[in-house]
Image (cartoon, rainbow, N blue to C red):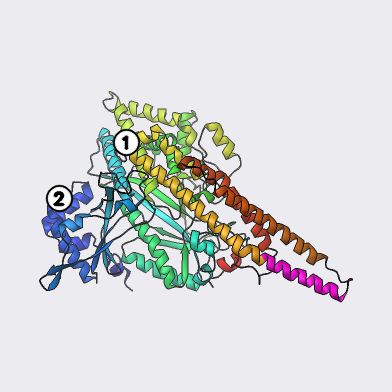
Amino acid sequence: MNVTELFASNVFNDEVMKNLLPKEVYKSLRKTVDEGAPLDNAIASAVANAMKDWAISKGATHYTHWFQPLTNLTAEKHDSFIEPSGDKVIMQLTGKNLIVGEPDASSFPSGGARETSAARGYTAWDPTSPAFVKEGTLYIPTVFVSYTGETLDKKAPLLKSMTALDTQTKRLLKLFGIECKKVSTTVGPEQEYFLIDEEVYLQRKDLVLTGRTLLGAPSARGQELEDHYFGSLKTRISDYMRDLDETLWSYGIYAKTKHNEVAPAQHELAPIFTTSNVAVDHNQLTMELMKKVAKKHDLVCLLHEKPFEGVNGSGKHNNWSLSTDAGLNLLDPGSNPENNTLFMLVLACVLAAVDRYQGILRASVASAGNDHRLGANEAPPAIISVYLGDQLGAIVDSIVLGKQYVPKKAVPGSIGVPESPIFPIDTTDRNRTSPFAFTGNKFEFRMLGSQASVADPNIVLNTIAAQLFSEAVETLAGAKDFAKACKDYTEKLLKKHYRIIFNYNGYGPEWEPEAERRGLLNNKTTADAVPEFFKQENIDVFVKQGVYTEREVVARAKISLENYIKTIEVEARTLIEMAKRDIYPAVNGYIAEVCSVIAAKRAVSEKIVCDADEELAQRLAMLNDGMAAAVKKLEGDLLEIPAGEGAASQKMAHVIVPDMEAVRTLSDAMEQLCSADYWPYPTYTEIMYSVK
């Protein structure tokens, strides 16, 4: 296999466009992609025809406008290229069909922004993300808007946030005498996931219906030995990963790193970073292909944030950076960051943005699945904070606290034997307990859930950074002594927002009370986090930067809460069914067998000891009766869900979820006592160690 020939072989990328498009058409399209210039509709027919011919050469018979509705998934409606021509047909893709499509907008979540009877919606071509051919269809990346103009997807606001950040950053750079055509954010989303045997998966009703196990006692062996992380790959897993790499490469996805993660059956794939909107498209396609490739190997890929209790869940690390088209990385501190005025100002603005808008940054990653991770010793806590590391931390401390700053330089290191190479030791360590950590020349936002769309947090990051850059320009423009004004403004921001910096262990018990003392938010559930979007100051930042209208912000918050409510309700009803129809009768059956054994022993002789049997039967009977009572309470509470997203989500978070935990606790206790012959579901050991 020639990887360089395979890479992007299914993508209508720059090389293909350069070869197939007329020179002037190509130049016009590149200007739109590279500089954000308005798309010239006059070139659409030429692009559409070339795209169609290329796709047909790849075996395509259909095309689809591929978009990202407010479901965290993608959507597609396939149309064939055929058009009538007398008694025959021709293969055609018109410029109009390339630019715009019309799916039913009423059938997608709108958060009240659309009436059910208002069905018309439009998909519009996004030329900044390349088209590709998959399974006989040409996929055209698009945005999705309603008839009245509301955005109904995640791509359109992401593009708007990128435009806002581009605009405000160029204004800021201009004050420093730096001109550029475009400023772009880049993202490299690491993706964690579980792989289990498909046959075992199909025997677990909870995995099939909810993506996670609602019941399950811990395996005798979990991750205690710390031997799975970076461990040798099993042959079946290695075959899957090889197949996945080759599939992703063919779609131009920069799959780079693969390894075993911490928990049994858990793994990770990390791509090379790319422009934010392309990275979002790539990640959505990656998640889809991970599942499809798994089925080819009789495996199931689980992307739920917490499919198994008691072992690590899966997240997604969002590596966010900011660069000009000339290659200037605005988050690169250089060799002397203390003297890098532009970097220190950009850093101060980002810190201020994260502090001021910590509520919506946390809310952007909120989901029912992610609630199981945030705050546990495997993910950042639900509290937003920033890790700067030793070097930048010392610089900020010198500014805010007046401490003397002693520059720390990278020094050579060695493991201490003559044969070992000399390697540079960085000036800053890494902190995996931090939600928002500076990692050399970028920030790593670690709070994303594994099945989340990368668009949501990047929309927020881009928007709030743009807002702070805008405020910096308004303050510094026209300053007589720009250098002094810049230094003073940087110092002011750092002092005002110093509370957001935490360079220590975010898992430690002392951090939560310390964060409370600092006045930082600690919204542990989606029901508590999402209402931050309803606050006027948070709505205003999106409106000011042209990313959302007020109605669009509110709609998205409502959709997030609705999704949370529905997810918990599905989980609760699945749990009730499993407990009543499977667990309860199975345990009763085993109790009956134990009682039969007791009776048989006593029939032989009253002197035969039955203490252990009696204790087991009594213990199981008590637990089973307790579970039945807990299920009854859960059923009753489900019948009393109040109207309105706010009240209903609070009931789900603070009543239904604890009810479910009560049922689970009793069931898991019985699983550890019940005979394996009677237990109706595969255990954690059977699931997590099913792939040999």
State whether residue 666 is above or below residue 233.
Answer: above
Q: In terms of depth relative to the viewer, which is nearer, 575 or 69?
A: 575
Q: Hey, which residue is sitting farthest left in the picture?
A: 86
Question: In the structure shown, which secondary structural element does the residue marked by tag 1 occupy?
Answer: helix
Q: Is residue 366 visible?
A: yes
Q: How many residues crowd around disc 2 within 10 Å: few (fewer than 14), some, or many (20 or more)?
A: few
Q: Main secondary structure of the magenta part?
A: helix
Q: In terms of depth relative to the viewer, which is nearer, 540 or 328?
A: 540
Give the Cα distance between marks 1 and 2: 27 Å
Q: Which residues are magenta?
A: 587-610
Image quadrant occupied by the N terminus: bottom left
Residue named by callout 2: 40
Q: Hey, which residue is sitting farthest right in the picture?
A: 607
Image quadrant occupied by the C terminus: bottom right
Of labels 1 and 2, earlier in sequence is: 2
Q: Is residue 603 magenta?
A: yes
Q: Hey, which residue is sitting farthest top in the picture?
A: 480
Q: Is residue 274 visible?
A: no
Disc 2 marks a residue whose amino acid type is Asp
Rendered residue at 35%/52% (across/down) = 108
Image location (x, y in percent) of residue 136: 27, 69
Q: Is residue 651 magenta?
A: no
As drawn, the label of residue 224 is none
Residue named by callout 1: 543
Disc 1 marks a residue whose amino acid type is Val
Q: Hey, which residue is sitting farthest bottom in the picture?
A: 604
Image location (x, y in percent) of residue 274: 33, 53
Give residue 611's quadrant in the image: bottom right
Rendered residue at 74%/60% (across/down) = 619
Q: Is residue 228 left or right of residue 386?
A: right
Q: Is residue 67 left or right of residue 613?
A: left
Q: Given this view, does label 1 or label 2 mark the residue nearer the observer?
A: 1
